[in-house]
Image: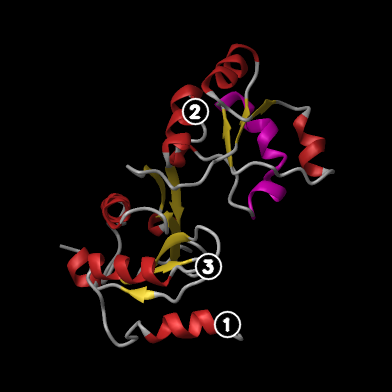
């Protein structure tokens, strides 16, 4: 993969052999986020889990205290009073069966999160092949299958993010924007780590977090000292 001059320059400031403390890593990632747009700061956590085993799957959600810096578009599947409630709570799109052909046939995906009331999951299930691979399928563990649509919408708009293992047992999550202060990013990161530590599967033997890297959209990764995170 060919890297640009800006990336190569930024990479020189990161010692690949070093494991950084959180404040130092955040300062470095912020400094190296020099693209012309407000880069997203992401955490990549390589775990010792084996996601092929149901009891080692990790999936959940956490509200970041300072949000993600991103405007999130929410689609809610609901009917009747729950549809009205979703509109009143600030959902960007609300609907039911009539949305199926639009998503399935027309490829409409102008939303970032899907929330559904439990009675609508039969309908939403028909979109599994489209929404599943994109990580958009509502899930009770993430709080996106619920009767309390107002709470779900407010939390998502306030900065709720979902975390889950990918096929390689890594968790990829945003922790804010490069324009955030170092304190805001540190708060968000600590909140995320606390939530993930609590989600450690009880059946897991050995190390839970094998490596944690912070990076910006266009910048080089900075590896953290995992031993200090586990305390």
Q: Residues within 10 Å of mark 2 (few under 14, many from 20)?
A: some
- Can you say whether 170 is above or below 120 in the image? below
SS label for mark 1? loop
* Residue 4 left/right relative to 106: left
Residue 82 is at least partly visible in this image: yes
Range shown magenta:
118-133
Residue for badge 2 = 146
Q: Tell me the distance, in whole angstroms, between the alpha carbons under discs 2 and 3.
A: 39 Å
Q: Residues within 10 Å of mark 1 (few under 14, many from 20)?
A: few
Most extreme residue toward the top, as rendered?
81
Using the image, tell me which numbered label, if any, was put on residue 35: 3
- Can you say whether 59 is above or below 157 in the image? below
Residue for badge 1 = 4
Residue at 47 percent across and 69 percent down: it is 34
Kindly report which numbered mark, 2 or 3, lies closer to the viewer in this rendering: 3
Using the image, tell me which numbered label, if any, was put on residue 62: none
Mark closest to the chain's N terminus, 2 or 1: 1
Q: Main secondary structure of the magenta part?
A: helix
- Nearer-the-camera pick, 143 or 17: 17
SS label for mark 3? loop
Q: Is residue 126 magenta?
A: yes
Q: Position of residue 124 (x, y in %)?
A: 67, 35
Q: Position of residue 73 (x, y in %)?
A: 59, 38
Mark closest to the chain's N terminus, 2 or 3: 3
Q: Is residue 146 magenta?
A: no
């Amino acid at each position: 993969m060919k890297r640009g001059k800006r990336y190569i320059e930024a990479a020189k400031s990161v010692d690949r052999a070093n494991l950084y403390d959180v404040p130092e890593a955040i300062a470095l990632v912020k400094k190296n986020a020099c693209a012309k747009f407000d880069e997203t700061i992401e955490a990549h956590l390589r775990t010792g889990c084996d996601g092929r085993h149901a009891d080692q799957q990790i999936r959940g959600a956490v509200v970041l205290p300072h949000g993600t810096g991103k405007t999130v578009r929410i689609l809610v599947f609901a009917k009747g009073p729950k549809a009205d409630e979703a509109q009143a709570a600030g959902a960007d799109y609300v609907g039911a069966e009539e949305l199926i052909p639009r998503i399935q046939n027309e490829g409409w995906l102008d939303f970032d999160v899907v929330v559904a009331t439990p009675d609508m999951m039969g309908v939403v299930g028909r979109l599994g092949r489209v929404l599943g691979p994109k990580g958009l399928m509502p899930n009770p563990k993430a709080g996106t299958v619920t009767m309390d649509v107002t709470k779900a919408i407010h939390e998502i708009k306030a900065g709720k993010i979902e975390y889950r293992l990918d096929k390689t047992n890594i968790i990829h999550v945003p922790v804010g924007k490069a324009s955030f202060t170092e304190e805001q990013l540190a708060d968000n990161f600590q909140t995320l780590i606390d939530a993930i530590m609590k989600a450690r599967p009880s059946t897991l033997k050995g190390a839970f977090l094998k490596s944690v890297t912070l990076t910006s959209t266009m910048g080089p990764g900075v590896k953290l000292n995992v031993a200090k995170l586990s305390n």
